[in-house]
Image (cartoon, coloured by chain):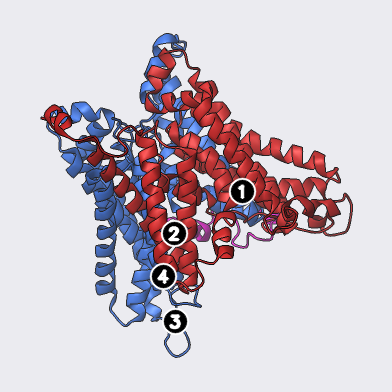
Amino acid sequence: MGIIKQVSRKPSFGDHMSNESFITLLMIGVLFVLFSIAAIFVPNFYQPQNMLNLITNNWFIVIIGIGVTFLLITGNFDLSVGGVIALTGVLAVYFSQTANASQNELANGLGLPYGVAVVLALLGAMSIGALNAFFVVRLKVPSIIVTLGTMMFARGIAQVITQGAQRNTSLPSEFGLVGNLALPGTSIKLSVLIMLILLVIAFIFERRTAAGRRTYLIGANADAARLSGVKVGRHLTVLFIISALLAGITGILLASEFKAGVSSRALGYEFDALVVTLLGGVSIMGGFGSVLGMLVGALILSVVTSAATGLLLSPDWQFTLKAIAVFIAIMAQGFALSRRKS
Amino acid sequence: MNPTVLSENVNVKHVQETSLPLRQNWPTVVKRTVKEYYIYFVLAFVVVVFSVAKLDEVALFERGHFLSPDNIINLLRSAVPILTLSGAFTLLMISGYIDLSIGSAMSLSAVVFALMVLSGFGFLFALIVTLIVGIGMGILNGYLVMKLRITPVIATLVTLSLYKGIALLIVPDGLSAIKGNAEHPMPAWINNYARQDVLLGLPLAFYVAVLAIVALIMVQKKTILGKYAAAIGGNPTAAALSGINAVLIVWLLYIIVGFFAALAGVARASFMSLGDPLSGDGMELAVIIAVLLGGTAFSGGEGSVAKSVVGAMIIISVTVGMLTVIPAYWQTFAMGSVLLIAAALNHYLQEELKT
């Protein structure tokens, strides 16, 4: 029956596309519709400045979303990114605070040069990624349970170092530089440029490198990947460490922007990162999804949350809105794909 | 297609095992004994450590010795929510599924219960409505996972956000929780359920939790539901081929979990005499730790309600005990570490001590 149908069906637009591109295109359409609706109901939504904000405001979610996307494609979760952001920020502050500055314990750090502090903090972030990889690859513990543990573990270290609060005194002047630097002549921050560079690298990795394609193979069928000679364990380890490194970079930038290491920074970001990947069509069943889709997902989330703020909904709405958005996205993508197959 | 996330690595595991020689240097009897009884030793160890620690030097610890009657009563009272929940959660884990929304479900139930009481309804009516809400949340979780086939972790993470969001929306703007004020106070009897001494200094909520545990142990050991749960978790294909309706069974388990999450929420609201929309945050972690300590397999098929309860007591002893010796900001670090240790221990029990 299916064969007859296929033969008799006229070739239509998009038949040559992969399912991934199809879903990405679908979500771009959704983004456009949502934006149009928001532009009608929310005053000043269509202004160029606001549109620019929609793209630039969520740079941190996009950066951590890259790592989360690749891991999700292999069928693994990374819920530790929020904790790693907090940890890296706090570590960077602690390492670069002046030693013996005052009586206050929270004002005293290690007095290292800023560059060294950043490198050490990033190493700290990567060690959390290595810990994730050890549990998932070696001990075969499901990633969801491991990264829930390291999420608390990383944030816990940040809380211990800051005694449950934050460190923001006796910092060298160059600490606040990177996060607040704007591109010459614009209001666009350096962080946004870093996001774009990382996106391009991720896109090339995903589409143009053998390692990038192996990620999909592992997600689609880990056994087949192993039998065809892919070093699954090593690949996953690298992805977990990269994901933690990306979270670490975000942590450094955020700490620099606010000139503080706050232990409660990035609470719930792990959920937001997951939300944008799911909105972008990445599937946990493995082997499906793209960085570009994740970027579209981040823009959708950005439009939804900023429209909610524009409509003066209380911030309490955000949890419900995100849940409904993800739920609709999953259903719509599943429906669209099944229609496409038939 | 892989029906559960928890078993995502199962196939990989088997491939590797066949190529590795299993360690056989421990006699089977020793292995089985260690596997069977280690958790009681862990609990005893934790209790002994906190009892021997120089508690009189710690200003925070005003109730005296860790094993003093007052402290034990306090320990058991604060353990009520996790005790209520861990049994049902174990059954769900045994079937190879997971519910990450229990913390939010508990918060939402606490808010609903407190709102009902504040609005002037009686205890029984408020309780029944809250339990119905809990059952409703379980039905939704089960529907998303079993009917729409959304991966359990993602489906319940979404409902985690949803239930938390609804709880936050119910609480009026400008308030942090549903609570009484000067002209409209919360009835004092809201405390009775979780605080009033019924027997041996323990409140009714504690005995309800014990009853729930006993009932769930019976369900696991004596009823067809327990057997089916283990069959579904052990080998979904075989279970389906032998005519077990996995959709129905697992859906039912989700509903049971929702029911007990609501019951735990009532206990929490009664204990705090307010409905805090964040009061259940992190409960899913505590319960997962308890269940892992109890030796329930990640991938399902094997586990014990009774041991999860012992695991829950370990968690509560550690949290309460820790608070007495080190500052509160160590708490997150401690919980994260305990979860990782529990996961490693669980792996060791499942893999190395295979009998």
Helix, strand or loop under label 1: helix
Q: Crowdedness of circle 3 by 10 Å Cα count: few (<14), some, many (20+)?
A: some
Identify the magenta region.
B50-79
Q: Amino acid at mark 1?
A: Arg
What colour has chain A?
A: red
Q: CA distance from mark 4 to mark 2?
A: 39 Å
Membership of A64 in magenta stretch: no
Q: CA distance from mark 1 to mark 2?
A: 19 Å
Front label number (1 vs 3): 1
Q: Badge 4 is on which residue?
A: A40
Q: CA distance from mark 1 to mark 3?
A: 34 Å
Relative image position of residue B164 (x, y in whole percent): 41, 61
Judged from this view, the residue extending furthest toward the bottom is: B183
Relative image position of residue B82 (x, y in whole percent): 41, 53
As drawn, B67 above or below B183: above
Q: CA distance from mark 4 to mark 3?
A: 41 Å
Q: Amino acid at mark 2?
A: Gly
Is label 4 on the same chain as label 2? no
Q: Badge 3 is on which residue?
A: B180
Residue B152 located left or right of residue A69: left
* Residue located 44% across and 53% down the image: B283
Return the chain for callout 1: A
Membership of B67 in magenta stretch: yes
As drawn, A208 above or below A305: above
Q: Amino acid at mark 4?
A: Ile
Q: Badge 1 is on which residue?
A: A155
Helix, strand or loop under label 4: helix
